[in-house]
């Protein structure tokens, strides 16, 4: 399974972006344990942003109320809608799909929020 992330870019504080992550092939939902987005800022460890598992979502406290994770199974795509962006949201964003005991990662997409 290959994941292709896109949608990053440069945006002013308060703006919005929508990230997309497309899987290379159809993955039967029954095999997926979770899908999610993580991010890594310079000099920091990778951190969880949002995950979705069996219809339940989980968000980092720092993005609650601003970011929304969603999926479109017909398009094999996971989205991250990011609103009210802040400079602290600047990072490389990675999508993740967990199938069984295996983790699959996208290549990362840069999000830069200017003040």
Image (spheres, grey):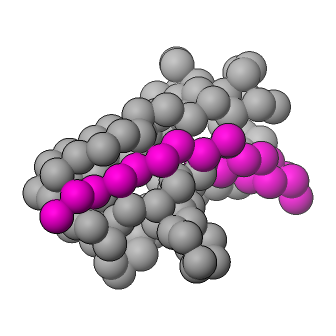
Residue furthest left in the image: 14
Tell me where residue 71 appears, x and y as whole percent: 46, 37
Measured as percent of width and height from the top left, residue 16 is found at 20, 46
Relative to the observer, which residue lies in front, 45 or 82?
45
**Residue in view at x 48 percent, y 47 percent:** 110
Taking 37 as reference, is 4 above or below it? above
Residue 101, picture quadrant: bottom right
Asked whether residue 106 appears in the rendered view, the answer is: yes
Front-most of 76 and 81? Answer: 81
- Name the residue located 35 percent from the left edge and 81 percent from the top edge: 61
Which quadrant is the C terminus positioned in?
bottom left
State whether residue 31 is above or below residue 60: above
Observer-nearest of 77 and 43: 43
Is 98 included in the stretch rendered in magenta? yes
Overall secondary structure of the magenta stretch? strand
User: Measured from the top left, where is residue 80 in percent x and y?
Assistant: 39, 46
| Residue 74 picture location, percent across and down | 52, 18
Q: Range of the magenta residues?
A: 95-115
* Residue at the (32%, 72%) spot, across then down: 88
Which residue corresponds to the image point at 40% horizontal and 50% vertical from the top-left?
111
Instruction: Say whether residue 106 is magenta.
Output: yes
């Amino acid at each position: 399974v290959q994941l292709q992330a896109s949608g990053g870019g440069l945006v002013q504080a308060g703006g919005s972006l929508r990230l997309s992550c497309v899987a290379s092939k159809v993955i039967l939902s029954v095999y997926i344990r979770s899908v999610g987005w993580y991010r890594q800022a310079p000099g920091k460890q990778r951190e969880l942003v949002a995950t979705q598992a069996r219809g339940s979502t989980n968000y980092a406290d720092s993005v609650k109320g601003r970011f929304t994770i969603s999926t479109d199974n017909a398009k094999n795509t996971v989205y991250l809608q990011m609103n009210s962006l802040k400079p602290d949201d600047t990072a490389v964003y990675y999508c993740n799909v967990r199938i069984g005991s295996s983790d699959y990662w996208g290549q990362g997409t840069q999000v830069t929020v200017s003040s």
